[in-house]
Image: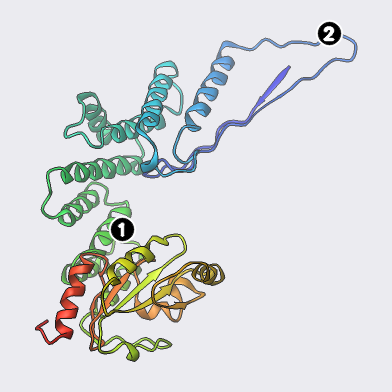
Amino acid sequence: MRTIICAALRPSVRLRIARFVGIAILSVPFLEPVRAQSTKPVSAESASVTVADKDWSDLESLLPNATGRQAGRVAKPEWALIARQARQFKEVHGNDDRSKKIRKIELVANLHLEEENEELAPATKKCLVDFLEDQTLPAEDRFDISAMSKARELKVGKNRQVPDPRAVREKHARELIREFPQDPRGYGYLLSTAQFGKSRGALEVAQEIIDNRNVPEAIKNRARLLRAQRQLEGKPLSIKGVDLAKFRGRPLLIYSWTIKQPEIFRLVEGWAKGRDLGIIGVNVDENTTAAENLTRSISVPGAQYYDRQGLDGTLTSQFKFTMPCSVYLVDADGVLRDVNGYEDTADKLVQLETVKKGGRP
């Protein structure tokens, strides 16, 4: 019997240990017509490679991407199994070319296992420090681990009631930029943090990114969009193709949505309950047929508008949406007051209602 082994392709590495390509093993017997089947001895080295490939394939099958789930939805017992399998692979196949990948897999699993612990176990902490300081490892892998450890710090901080989580996120993003200046993801994290901040801070971060020569153009374009969005605040909102005048005299909530995140309907219904509130929904799916079918099958809040070009369409681009699901709040005079209506929505609506009834803004 001859055994043909297709070697594993080199996987790309992302924060959640993105795609892994499995190993295909095909065994084909070749029989002699007269003589007895010939056998060819397998060297110890060849047998060792076969075992290593099999162990690697078994480990890959446990990883989140192989099971079609996000890392955050993997249960702790499964992370424990991944960590154990990675540790065993390292012990048995220490000289294997995949040993660097194994280090990352084991560390990611342990960080998930200890994500709610106030302090990392000494062994995990040492592995983390060694990994981040090892310049022989790919920079993108060290970025992933550094970002993950910082996210863990923020999650643990929730138990201590961190006064300003957004400030901590911005601090972490700037640390990533200093640690890995060649990795554009640090700037992407910084921009994402600014999207949920107050307009003045968001504008400052957007301008900082636009002026930075080291930032890729794609991220600069996102920063330009964020700047344009925040510049809409405090001005009368006018959208070609949408009759906003009929909502004058009462607050208006505008939300964008996608069929991948239908939970926004429930949120909008909750915010609108018991209020004299105008509502407009803007679908940003390119497959508008599926979106329209969804709105016909369930009850959705507000008048609905669709744009076949998604976020870059003629209609949607006027709103300057920076995310598929955004919430804008417009006062009774038609002035856009908040493009970050997702946060503290109920309190903000109360303020708009107070202005409507003659109170001071």
For the question of whether residue 73 can be seen, the reply is: yes
* Quarter where residue 265 is shown: bottom left
* Residue 217 place in picture, x, y as percent: 36, 66
Kind of residue sitting beneath label 2: Ala
Judge by depth and name the residue closer to the eye, 235 or 18: 235
- For residue 346, side relative to residue 31 (left or right): left
Q: Is residue 200 left or right of residue 287?
A: left
Marks 2 and 1 close (CB-CB < 8 Å)? no
Q: Residue at x 10, y 53 (%)?
A: 163
Q: Residue furthest right?
A: 34
* Residue 220 in sight from this viewpoint: no
At label 2, counting other C-alpha atoms closer than 10 Å, the crowd grade (few under 14, some 14-19, many 20 or more) is: few
Residue reaching furthest front?
274
Q: Nearer the viewer, residue 187 or 338?
A: 338
Q: Badge 1: how crowded within 10 Å, few (<14), some, or many (20+)?
A: many
Q: Is residue 184 above or below residue 142?
A: below
Residue occupying image coordinates x 41% and y 19%:
88
Numbered tag placed on residue 36 in the rendering: 2
Instruction: Using the image, determine if residue 12 lies above or below residue 37.
Output: below
| Residue 90 coordinates in the image, percent (x, y) | 40, 21
User: Residue 200 appears in which quarter of the rendering?
Assistant: bottom left
Q: Which quadrant would the N terminus be assigned to in this image?
A: top right
Identify residue for label 1: 188
For marks 2 and 1, the one nearer the N-term is 2
Number of on-image labels: 2
Secondary-structure class at tag 2: loop
